Image (tube, rainbow, N blue to C red):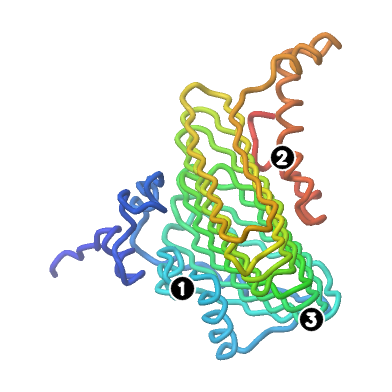
Amino acid sequence: MPAVVMPNTADWLSQLAGVPMPARGQEDWRFTELAALQGLAPELWSGVDPFAQINLPAGISRIGADEAQGLQQQGLNSTGGGNVWSVRLNQGASPRCLALRVAGEAGPLQLHFDAGAAPGLLALQLVLVLEEGASLELLIQHGSSGPNATSFVVVAQLARGAKCNLGLLAPGDARASLLSHLSISQAPASSLQVTTAVGGWALSRLEPCIIQLEGAAQTRLRALQLVDGKELADTHSQVSFEGPDGQLDQLHKVVADGAGRSVFNGAVRVPRRAQQTNAAQLSRTLLLSERARVDTKPELEIVADDVKCAHGATISRLQQNELFYLQSRGIGAEQASRLLLRGYCEEVLRELPAAAAALNPLELLLRERL
């Protein structure tokens, strides 16, 4: 019998997406090294459906497949996510899908997805519809312990007055990749908080794309990236205001050690119709190694003339005066460094949904540093 020839991984991924893999010449991908993804076994993950045994709390119900497909397409169209390569890859990889409707004040929900040690590409989709005045606190966990990749697409719609606190906690494996795209649309008077904490992956790329459909909504983004060894963590966020009186508060924090690399590209778009927008964006990086690298690129595209918009970026090391103060109180140098590192990370981690506290997110993400 003739030998079975396995397809080239890059070609296989391109076939799934229907377009070639991103090239370094593309602006959104020029800092993103895809070697970890190209080393993936060209096969779909074959484990048990992670959505099969989920128990839903009161106030949350499932949406049928046909309606979910329409809602997903509508949500991706509103943010421009339909043509993003990571979304196209997900759609072509036979994704498992969970679609939920939230009414009233729903109980907290936790979703845990772990690709384990099995090879291949695990593709997941989550569709959320929060009805008028509904509220939801959702903690999503991702994990891996082997040479695989997880592709995760979230599409969420927040109706008028809805409140959503979405947390993503993702301690990974140095052989694994995580691609996560969030397309979220907000109606007026809605409130959204997204907190992400990611570390340990060979490659992680997060793409939060948020649109305030008529303005007059609140968006709060908190993110923590941790990179060590040769890990790469990449965040490309986009927030668009399509009406007046919108608010954005965004903080992106990084801890970079070893030869790790962090990328942050944060785009904020304020067209003329979005008068009286109040948007603040801050990128902060803590470098623990001479070999670590950080590429940060805040982008504010402002056409409206009656706005308050600000952005900033800082890169620093552990502050010597703070270390000296702790050591002068009898705390050893190594313990002092750990305490400062904890405090730096806790500013983001404490804003994860309440269920995260029992998981000890610092220990999960920082591991041997603590």
Query: In the image, what residue type sits under mark 1?
Result: Gly
- Mark 1 vs 3, N-terminal side: 1
In the displayed structure image, the side of residue 138 where residue 96 appears, left or right:
left
Instruction: Characterize the local packing of mark 2: few (<14), some (14-19) or many (20 or more) Cα atoms within 10 angstroms.
Output: some
* Placement of 6 over or under 103, stated as above or below: above
Q: Check residue 362 in the rendering and tell me which mark sits there, or answer none.
A: 2
Give residue 35's position: percent from left, percent from top: 35, 46
Q: Quadrant of residue 252?
A: top right
Q: CA distance from mark 1 to mark 3?
A: 25 Å
How crowded pointer 1 is (Cα within 10 Å; few <14, some 14-19, many 20+) is rated as: some
Q: Which mark is residue 82?
A: 1
Residue furthest toward the left?
2
Q: Earlier in the sequence, mark 1 or mark 2?
A: 1
Q: Amino acid at mark 2?
A: Leu
Q: Marks 2 and 3, Cα distance to the nearest angstrom?
A: 35 Å
**Foreground disc of the pair 1, 2:** 1
Classify the position of the C terminus by image quarter: top right
